[in-house]
Structures are given as structure tokens and as C-alpha cells.
């Protein structure tokens, strides 16, 4: 992509161009349209969501203010009323299992949904508010004032014939690879260590089989996060229930994956064969295989969020929260996109879409969960992806549990602290390191 | 971990056969395999979820863009500057998800 010249004359085609009709882009376009601005939402897929995959649970609280009673119409598969965190070794599993019936009633908590459904629904809300949605159109670069490479951003070039779109402000919601944020010079460096790749199978199973296997009824569903299931590659796994499919997948750290000898689908096959997972997912047809990259490192990899004439939101700005027990990006994208949309609408009204005129965006995010959570949890991705959490902790936990529940008559039961000391020694965990990481975790999560 | 017992694992062809690709005429990713010849790591081969990077007997890489998830893994792990020219397919083309 290159910096290309701008058409010199005439008023801009739109007040704002939003690139990408994912959750961030649709939220931005919705807020711009509601503020009465002329906004174009450009999406390269044939429909919004066509290019997007995730685990999948959407946490809807951020929608309460944007779209009151959203739960009455959002394309939801199941409401998550049961959450598990599974810690695996090759042959053992220790699971924390939580149920909460309140999560199955309005205003709800998390919902499983297919992204092609959810993203198309959210984009339609922006259209209903007055945004112009243009699909099947790839943005190929930024337009700069007077064609200068460092000039203010004044629109985008697309792959349509005569496809330049001029605007007072561009909101880049183009996802994890954000070529627009990179072209705008907002990413200082790109380090593969900050990224993971997610792969997933969507497996068809009859609805009553899913209810039975996962112990839920009606439109209630289950969310399982898994640690210790990715071999030598740092990462994690997940299982989610949809109405008549189950999603099972892995998230894998890029540097170690590319240095290893196991391909993503091979690691996934191992997870699916694990004695704790196989009974949940076996037997059905794979309806869709999918893959997508995640910006894993959160706060520490975020780019500049504002440039002259441009704002960045969602995965494009690494706003996905990937911290082990949490994998939330859709809600962060919506929160950031809405803030970007409001900021852009104000800036257009005040006729100042320079970096200074758009600076309020960062302040809005700092005072909301988007940057507050990311700032507080900035250590979490490193902790969760570290050797202690990935390799040693699962062995110690399952070793301790095994000893605790294996009856050793006629020997007397060992004391818990004896077991713990023995297991830590066996798996090479030093008290010093455990305490150090424990304190770091307490500071981060506590 | 135990090998799968009752249910054989899906072949890679049927795995990719579950995905819709509206293939564009023009390749969106181009690999310069003269540069790959000097590459010692070949991270793309193991990491590409669609398994599109195939080492050749001549020490190069055979690449086909048609069944690509457009994920970005390959350019992120690539070892050699300039080996991969990466962009998105023409609008409306490429991978199309339905239940992900
Ligand atoms: C395996 C996996 C599991 C996950 N699990 C969860 C989960 O359970 N819950 C959760 O909340 N989050 C989850 N996430 C994270 C979540 O998917 C992302 O954080 C979220 O999608 C970010 O939204 P976004 O709008 O910023 O970007 P995206 O959803 O990526 O949307 C970007 C959009 O821009 C379009 N686009 C990109 N470039 C261009 C261009 N040049 N021209 C035109 N259009 C363009 C794309 O087609 C796309 O529609 C997961 C992610 C992965 C990969
Ligand atoms: S990592 Fe890059 S240079 Fe090496 S073989 Fe793959 S594409 Fe070629
Ligand atoms: S973008 Fe992803 S699927 Fe496509 S070639 Fe690169 S690694 Fe493979």
C-alpha cells in the first residue's frame, strides 16, 4: 500500500469513513450516524462478519447503553450459565466449574454467537441509524493532504474503480493486521511475540446431545477455558456450546509455534482426544474450520491511538484482552469503537480533525474499562504465557490433586504440605519463583 | 495425550473442504521463493493453519493462495525480509465464514 495523492477540489464525500464492519467499526459508525454525521462503513467481506472468527462468547454489558434491550433481538446461540477453567496434563484434568442461573436471565452476562450473524446484526444497527455500508470493498491505502506522505489523512483508497473516498476523519477498525494504523505510522514496531493464532472447529451435534453432554437445558450454554493443552507451544484452548454445534479450538503463540514441529490442527487433534475433552466433542461433523490472529500482548503492544485525521479502535489497536481466564475482544472493540465514533463526531462538528482535535479519544478510553482494564492487567498476558503457568503449574496442580485423592492404604495419608513440596520439587518449581509469580499475579488480578 | 480411538481424525482435505473460499483471480499473497532458499527457519511451513507453504525438493517453497484464511500468521513469522508480499484479496473474495 502506498500514500497516494488526494483529489484537490471539492468537499469531502463523507464526514467520516470507518474501515472494517467488525464490532469496533459498526459501533463507531453507529455513534457517528446518531450524531448526524455522514458516515461510510467500508467492509472487504461480502457481508459484515464474513472474515471474522473468534471463540465465541460476546459479553453484552457494553451494549446496554448503545442498544437497550439488545438481548431481545441479538442473534444469540446460547446464554452462558456455566463456566469452567480446565487445567490439563496429558492424562489428567483439574476443573473449576461455576454455574450461575442469573446469567441466563435479562440482562444476561455472556452469549455464544456466530460472528457472521452477530457482526451483520450490529452493522445493520449502524445502517438503520443512517450509515452507508459498502461491502465487498477492500481499502488499499490512506489518502493524504496534498499527497504528502506525512500529510493529514483525508480519506481512503479502495479497490473499486474510481474508489477513492474522501472524509474529514478516518476511523481504522480494520482488525489485528491493521495495515492502516501501520501505514499511518502509529505502530512503532511489529513483534511476532505479541501475537497468537487461533484455530477452531465448529462441530455439528444434535441439540439434545449437547444439552446432555454439557449438563445444560433450554437456551443455556457452557464456556470452557483450558490451560496445559498446547504441548510445548504457549497458549490455551477453549470449548463453547452453540445451539446445535460445539466450537473447539486453540490459541497458539506464534514464535514457538513456528519453531516447533506440530502444526495447529495436530495440536488441536490432541486436545480433542484428551480424556476430559473427547466425550464432549467427539462424533459430529466438522461444519467449518477457521483461523485468525489475536493481538495477545494487550497494553504493552498498543500503537498510538490518534494521528492527524485518523483514529484506531479495536484489534487494530491491540485492544483485545487475552489474559488466560479472560478472552474478551468484542466488548473491548465495541467500547473503543463507540468512543472513537463520538470523538470523531465532536471533532467534525468543531471542524478540527487534526491529532489535537481528536485527542479526547484517549481520555475517553482511559476513563472507561477499555484502557483501565488493559492498564491494570498489562502483566497478565506475560504471566499466563510464561513457563510457570504453561508447563509447570498444570503438572503441579494435577499431581497434588492425584496424590490427595489416591488412597494409599496401608500407608497413612500424606499431609498436603508434604504433597505440595514433593510435587513442586518433581516438576522443578522453586518456591522463590512461585512466590514471585504469585505476587505478580496478586498485584495484577488482585 | 492418548491417540483418538473411536473417531478417526479428519483428513486435511476434508478439514479445508468445510471452508468456503471465493477465489479471486489475482493472488493476494506472493512468495518469492528465491529468498526462501536462504531461509533456515521455515516457520511458515509449520505455522500456516491452511498448510499453504510446501517445501520443494529444490529447496524452495511452493505456495498457493487459494485456500487462505487471510490470518496474517505467515508474514508475522517469516524470517526473511521481502519473501512474502502480503495483502488482502480483492473485495468480496477470499475466505467466507458462516459459523465461526
Ligand atoms: C480464536 C479467537 C477466539 C476469540 N474469542 C473471543 C471471545 O470468546 N470473546 C470475545 O469477546 N473476543 C474473542 N476474540 C477476540 C475478538 O474476536 C476480537 O477482539 C474482535 O473481533 C475485534 O473486533 P474488531 O472490530 O476490532 O476487529 P475484527 O472483528 O477483526 O473486524 C475487522 C473488520 O475489518 C475488515 N477489514 C480489515 N481490513 C480491511 C480493509 N483493508 N478494507 C475493508 N475492510 C477491512 C475485516 O473484514 C473485518 O470485518 C477471539 C479471537 C480469536 C481469534
Ligand atoms: S519463513 Fe519466510 S523466508 Fe522462510 S520459507 Fe517461509 S516464507 Fe520463505
Ligand atoms: S495468511 Fe494465514 S492462512 Fe493465509 S497463507 Fe498466511 S498463514 Fe496461511
Image (spheres, helix red, strand yellow):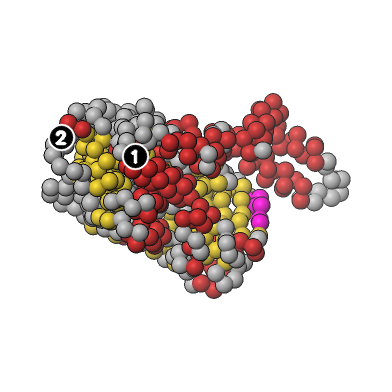
Q: Is residue A95 magenta?
A: yes
Q: Chain of mark 2?
A: A
> Which of A350 and A242 lies nearest the eye of the viewer?
A350
Q: Residue at x 13, y 39 (%)?
A: A9
Q: Above or below — where is A436 with respect to A282? A: above
Crowding around mark 2 (Cα neighbors within 10 Å: few <14, some 14 to 19, many 20+) is: some
Q: Is residue A144 magenta?
A: no
Residue A5 tag number: 2
Residue A15 in sight here: yes
Give the mark nearest the N terminus, 2 or 1.
Answer: 2
Secondary structure of residue under mark 1: loop
Q: Residue at x 27, y 28 (%)?
A: B81
Residue A344 in sight here: no
Q: Above or below — where is B98 with respect to A218? A: above
- Give the mark toward the camera: 2 or 1: 1
Query: Residue A154, percent across and down?
Result: 24, 38
| Cα–Cα gap, marks 2 and 1 | 26 Å
Query: Residue A319, percent across and down?
Result: 45, 41
> Which of B19 and A73 lies nearest the eye of the viewer?
A73
Query: Residue A105, percent across and down?
Result: 60, 66
The reply to whether callout 2 and callout 1 are in contact (CB within 8 Å) is no
Q: Residue at x 37, y 28 (%)?
A: A189
In this picture, residue A178 sits left or right of residue A397: left
Q: Chain of mark 1?
A: A
In the picture, the quarter occupied by the N terminus of chain A is top left
| Span colored in magenta | A93-98
Residue A350 tag number: 1
Q: Above or below — where is A95 with respect to A370? A: below
Q: Residue at x 17, y 31 (%)?
A: A146
Instruction: Determine if marks 2 and 1 fall on one subunit.
Output: yes
Amino acid at each position: 500500500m502506498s500514500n497516494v495523492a488526494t483529489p484537490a477540489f471539492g468537499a469531502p464525500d463523507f464526514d467520516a469513513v470507518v474501515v472494517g464492519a467488525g464490532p469496533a467499526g459498526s459501533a463507531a459508525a453507529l455513534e457517528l450516524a446518531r450524531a448526524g454525521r455522514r458516515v461510510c462503513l467500508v467492509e472487504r467481506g461480502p457481508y459484515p462478519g464474513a472474515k471474522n472468527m473468534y471463540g465465541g462468547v460476546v459479553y453484552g454489558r457494553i451494549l446496554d447503553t448503545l442498544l437497550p434491550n439488545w438481548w431481545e433481538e441479538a442473534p444469540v446461540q446460547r446464554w452462558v450459565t456455566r463456566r469452567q477453567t480446565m487445567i490439563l496434563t496429558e492424562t489428567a484434568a483439574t476443573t473449576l466449574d461455576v454455574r450461575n442461573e442469573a446469567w441466563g436471565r435479562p440482562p444476561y452476562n455472556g452469549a455464544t454467537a456466530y460472528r457472521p450473524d452477530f457482526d451483520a446484526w450490529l452493522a445493520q444497527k449502524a445502517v438503520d441509524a443512517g450509515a452507508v455500508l459498502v461491502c465487498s470493498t477492500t481499502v488499499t491505502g490512506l489518502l493524504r493532504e496534498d499527497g504528502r506522505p506525512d500529510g493529514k489523512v483525508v480519506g481512503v483508497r479502495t479497490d473499486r474503480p474510481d474508489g477513492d473516498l474522501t472524509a474529514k476523519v478516518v476511523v481504522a477498525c480494520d482488525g489485528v493486521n491493521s495495515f492502516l494504523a501501520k501505514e499511518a505510522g502509529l505502530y512503532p514496531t511489529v513483534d511476532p511475540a505479541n501475537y497468537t493464532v487461533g484455530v477452531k472447529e465448529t462441530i455439528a451435534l444434535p441439540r439434545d446431545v449437547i444439552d446432555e453432554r454439557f449438563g445444560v437445558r433450554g437456551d443455556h450454554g457452557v464456556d470452557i477455558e483450558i490451560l496445559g493443552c498446547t504441548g510445548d507451544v504457549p497458549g490455551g484452548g477453549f470449548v463453547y456450546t452453540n445451539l446445535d454445534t460445539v466450537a473447539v479450538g486453540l490459541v497458539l503463540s506464534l514464535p514457538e509455534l513456528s519453531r516447533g514441529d506440530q502444526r495447529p490442527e495436530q495440536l488441536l487433534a490432541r486436545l480433542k482426544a484428551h480424556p476430559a475433552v473427547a466425550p464432549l466433542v467427539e462424533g459430529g461433523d466438522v461444519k467449518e474450520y477457521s483461523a485468525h490472529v489475536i493481538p495477545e500482548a494487550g497494553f504493552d503492544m498498543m500503537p498510538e491511538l490518534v494521528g492527524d485525521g485518523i483514529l484506531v479502535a479495536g484489534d487494530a489497536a491491540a485492544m483485545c484482552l487475552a489474559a488466560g481466564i479472560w478472552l474478551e475482544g468484542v466488548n473491548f472493540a465495541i467500547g473503543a469503537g463507540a468512543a472513537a465514533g463520538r470523538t470523531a463526531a465532536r471533532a467534525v462538528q468543531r471542524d478540527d480533525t487534526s491529532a489535537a482535535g481528536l485527542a479526547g479519544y484517549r481520555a475517553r478510553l482511559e476513563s472507561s474499562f477499555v484502557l483501565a482494564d488493559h492498564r491494570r492487567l498489562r502483566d497478565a498476558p506475560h504471566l499466563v504465557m510464561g513457563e510457570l503457568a504453561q508447563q509447570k503449574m498444570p503438572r503441579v496442580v494435577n499431581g497434588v490433586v492425584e496424590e490427595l485423592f489416591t488412597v494409599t492404604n496401608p500407608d497413612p495419608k500424606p499431609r498436603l504440605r508434604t504433597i505440595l513440596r514433593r510435587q513442586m520439587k518433581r516438576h522443578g518449581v522453586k518456591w522463590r519463583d512461585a512466590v514471585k509469580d504469585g505476587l505478580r499475579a496478586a498485584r495484577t488480578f488482585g | 495425550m492418548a491417540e483418538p480411538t473411536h473417531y478417526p481424525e479428519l483428513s486435511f482435505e476434508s478439514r479445508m473442504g468445510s471452508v468456503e473460499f471465493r477465489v479471486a483471480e489475482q493472488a493476494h499473497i506472493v512468495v518469492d521463493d528465491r529468498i526462501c532458499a536462504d531461509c533456515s527457519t521455515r516457520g511458515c511451513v509449520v505455522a500456516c493453519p491452511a498448510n499453504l507453504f510446501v517445501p520443494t525438493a529444490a529447496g524452495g517453497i511452493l505456495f498457493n493462495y487459494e485456500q487462505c484464511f487471510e490470518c496474517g500468521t505467515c508474514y508475522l513469522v517469516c524470517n526473511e525480509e521481502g519473501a512474502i508480499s502480503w495483502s488482502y484479496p480483492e473485495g468480496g473474495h477470499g475466505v467466507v465464514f458462516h459459523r465461526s
